[in-house]
Image: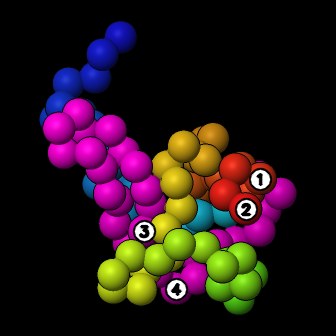
Amino acid sequence: MMENLNDSKLYSRQLIGKTVVSKTGKRFGEVINLSFETRTGELLQILLRNPTGYCEGLNLERDKNGALLIPFSSVIAVGDFVVIAEEDII
């Protein structure tokens, strides 16, 4: 079933401020923003604020403002937290 664009925007807004954790429970930081392909609306990356020391030590890519970037393709679940597969980003 296809989501309409308005549902996708609402869903994206609900991710802002959520804590990002690995499936083993390691905390990474909080979602500050999302980057997406403007033509298709595909979510590409999660931008993190307040990264943990563990996350800082992974040497992840950063945007031009210094926010850490997590590929959206690593997201495996969204609920109270955004859960990522750590092996997909390191």
Residue 61 relative to residue 25: left or right:
left
> Which residue in the protein does label 3 denote?
47
> Which residue in the protein does label 2 denote?
90
Q: Position of residue 31 (x, y in %)?
A: 44, 67
Q: Marks 2 and 3: CB-CB under 8 Å?
A: no
Q: Marks 1 and 2: CB-CB under 8 Å?
A: yes
Q: Considering depth in this image, is 34 or 61 the residue closer to the camera? A: 61
Q: Considering depth in this image, is 50 or 60 the residue closer to the camera? A: 60
From mark 1 to mark 2, how far is it between C-alphas? 6 Å
Please name the residue shown 49% across and 49% down the image. Answer: 72
Mark whose residue sits in front, 2 or 3: 2
Q: Marks 4 and 3: CB-CB under 8 Å?
A: no
Residue 87: which numbered mark, if any?
A: 1
Q: Amino acid at mark 3?
A: Leu
Query: What secondary structure is marked by label 4?
Result: loop
> Which residue in the protein does label 4 denote?
50
Q: Amino acid at mark 4?
A: Asn
Q: Check residue 90 for magenta coloring.
A: no
Earlier-in-chain disc, 4 versus 1: 4
From mark 4 to mark 3, how far is it between C-alphas? 10 Å
The magenta span reads 23-51
Q: Quadrant of the N terminus?
A: top left
Whether residue 17 is visible: no
From mark 2 to mark 4, how far is it between C-alphas? 19 Å
Please name the residue shown 65% across and 85% down the image. Answer: 56
Badge 2: residue crowd in 10 Å (few <14, some 14–19, many ≥20): few
Query: What secondary structure is marked by label 1?
Result: helix
Q: Check residue 50 for magenta coloring.
A: yes
Q: Amino acid at mark 1?
A: Glu
